Image (cartoon, rainbow, N blue to C red):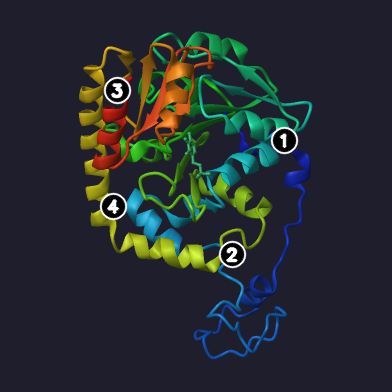
Amino acid sequence: MFSLQSLIRPNILALQPYSSARDEFKQDSNQIADLANFTFLDANENSLGSVIGNFHRYPDPLQQQLKKEIAQWRGVQPNQIFLGNGSDEAIDLLFRIFCEPQQDHVITLPPTYGMYEVAANINNVKIKKISLTADYQLDTNKILQAIDKQTKLIFVCTPNNPTANSIDPASIHTLLAQFQGLVVVDEAYIDFADSPSWVSKLSHYPNLVVIQTFSKAFGLAALRLGMAFASPEIIAYFNKVKPPYNINAETQRLALQVFAKKDQVQRQIATIKTEREKLRQALNFLPLVEKIYPSDANFLLVKVQNADNLYQKLIQQGIVVRNRSKVTLCEGCLRITVGTPEENKKLIESLKQM
Ligand SMILES: *Cc1c(COP(=O)(O)O)cnc(C)c1O
């Protein structure tokens, strides 16, 4: 049986969270309808205002307006959403809420996103690594064998970075059903995939956490805005532990603006997917390309002859790709982000010269 309480670190269970001036005011003002006419002398803000714009009030610590939009878009309730300063904040909080340093551990499935390991190291939490299979799928039996009482989190990235493929849903269902800790499904690239989001399975699985980001499909990497979706009970622990004002007012305002332009974002996603397939075809013709892996993301993993050399030559041409040639199971591979049509042409032209 899944028990959330038994997974939480004792110090977090016992934690008395920070209570801000506005939190306390809101608790004491339930009965009052119109808050706009209040004189706010409770938070030591600069009452004269900021000299560069409307910035002098602390932002909404729970980002309620923005969460309402996200909830509608993803078909969940606002209390199933955590917003972080990048999805990296959600990943870090998972460690801080669930993993007792030097005692608990997590499972990662390399080759995958490097941040899980860094967050584990920062939090002094051990990792068990279970490699993906040769076709970049989960080795479900090995993962299940590696689980013990101290296993708190399993990170599954789908579509996976850097391999670009989606993970077979059946194997994720198996983990969710058999594992009593949390299965963290990182969907940073889900908008470029044809498969549905795991967010729709949240009501089936109390141990599911889905991570998404505004950095990729939404084109807002500079804002630093990430999401975690989970049960209201898990999200309540995120809210308890997070810095009170972790998402600044400008980020909340700008992210709301992008929801008014969702159609444009959808068109961009369609363009990127078309460009991805055009890039695949063009690369396929080049003799130095040995293999292009299937992609459900906005990048291609490409096996080439002499990857290190090619990477350096591209830099000399002013083109930067990611060299993954030293990564186990990605030997000889470059990871290439889909660019604009012009950028992709420039890349192909440069490669043709080599
Ligand atoms: C890019 C990426 C993220 C996004 O991280 P942010 O901190 O939200 O920018 C998360 N997970 C994976 C696998 C990624 O590749």
Q: Amino acid at mark 2?
A: Pro
Element marked by disc 4: helix
Of 19 and 309, which appears nearest the observer?
309
Q: Position of residue 216 (x, y in %)?
A: 40, 44
- As drawn, is 12 to the left or to the right of 320? right
| Residue name at image x 76 percent, y 51 percent | 15
Q: Position of residue 272 (x, y in %)?
A: 27, 40
Q: Amino acid at mark 4?
A: Val
Per the image, the residue denoted by label 4 is 265
Question: Which one is earlier in the sequence, the residue at label 3 or at label 1?
Answer: 1
| Residue name at image x 49 percent, y 48 percent | 227
Q: Quadrant of the N terminus?
A: top right
Element marked by disc 1: helix
Please state which of the two labelled residues, at mark 3 or mark 1, is closer to the viewer: 3
Q: Are marks 2 and 1 in contact (CB under 8 Å)?
A: no
Ligand 1: does it lie within 8 Å of the C-beta at label 2? no
Q: Is residue 2 above or below residue 216?
A: above
Q: Is residue 94 above or below residue 290?
A: below
- Which label belongs to residue 122? 1
- As drawn, is 239 to the left or to the right of 176? right
Q: Position of residue 210 (x, y in %)?
A: 47, 39
Per the image, the residue denoted by label 2 is 61
Q: State the separation of the CA atoms marked 3 and 1.
A: 44 Å
Question: Which one is earlier in the sequence, the residue at label 2 or at label 1?
Answer: 2
Q: State the separation of the CA atoms marked 2 and 1.
A: 25 Å
Element marked by disc 2: loop
